[in-house]
């Protein structure tokens, strides 16, 4: 497990250096193994009366949007068991919180994000010469989607 601390200074300046070195090291050593299990420790001061979750704060979301643009394969190396995938997606996809059911993503927005990610990560896995799609398929299952192998065959057939 790798924990990356992000403070308000980094968030407000859109500074990705706290995570960049971790990801670059992983890419150089073992991109075929998704063993980084990345977690974020976000230190952002909030007024005690501010009821917003971190994913509802525009400055934090903007930092995650920049992070996602720079490292689009990041969801594959998050610590899913610790809930980091759900939190990461909440930073990028419109949602609401339900006290009983937790995060409720906008269904259309989530579907668009998931399919965009599938296309992007399928291509990235191919460029990394990683034929195994199981991690990608499991990621989409965690978000409520089942991928048929026919989709991958279709995508690979376009080359």
Image (cartoon, rainbow, N blue to C red):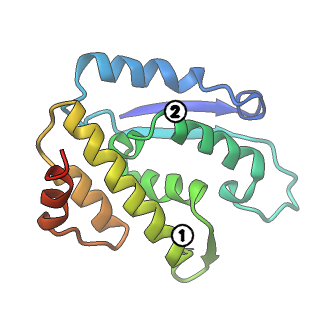
Q: What's the residue at 31%, 46% (across, down)?
A: 121
In the rendered image, the vertical position of residue 134 relative to residue 95, given as above or below: above
| Mark count | 2
Dot 2: element? helix
How far across and how far down the image is residue 76, in percent?
A: 33, 44
Dot 1 crowding, Cα within 10 Å, few <14, some 14–19, many 20+: few
Which residue is label 2 attached to? Answer: 70
Q: How far from the left and from the top, in percent, is residue 2?
A: 40, 31
Q: Is residue 17 left or right of residue 29?
A: right
Question: Is residue 47 toward the left or the right of residue 141 in the image?
Answer: right
56 left or right of 147 in image = right
| Residue 81 seen in render | no
**Residue placed at 22% from the left, 68% from the top?**
147
Between the C-alphas of marks 1 and 2, the distance is: 20 Å
Q: Quadrant of residue 12?
A: top right
In the rendered view of the protein, which quadrant contains the N terminus? top left
Quadrant assignment for the C terminus:
top left
The one of 113 and 59 positioned closer to us in this rendering: 113
The numbered disc on residue 109 is 1
- Compared with 111, 38 (above or below) is above
Picture coordinates of residue 96 (x, y %)? Answer: 64, 74
Element type where label 1 sits in the image: helix
Q: Residue at x 41, y 25 (%)?
A: 23
């Amino acid at each position: 497990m790798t924990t990356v601390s992000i403070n308000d200074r980094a968030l407000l300046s859109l500074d990705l250096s706290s995570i960049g070195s971790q990801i670059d090291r992983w890419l150089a050593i073992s991109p075929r193994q998704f063993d980084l299990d990345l977690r974020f420790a976000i230190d952002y001061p909030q007024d005690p009366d501010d009821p917003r979750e971190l994913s509802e704060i525009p400055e934090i979301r903007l930092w995650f949007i920049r992070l996602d643009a720079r490292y689009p394969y990041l969801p594959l190396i998050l610590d899913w068991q610790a809930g980091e995938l759900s939190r990461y997606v909440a930073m990028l996809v419109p949602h609401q919180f339900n006290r009983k059911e937790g995060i409720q993503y906008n269904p259309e927005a989530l579907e668009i994000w998931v399919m965009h990610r599938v296309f992007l990560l399928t291509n990235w896995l191919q460029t990394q010469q990683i034929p195994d799609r199981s991690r990608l398929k499991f990621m989409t299952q965690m978000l409520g989607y089942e991928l048929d192998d026919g989709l991958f065959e279709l995508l690979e057939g376009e080359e």
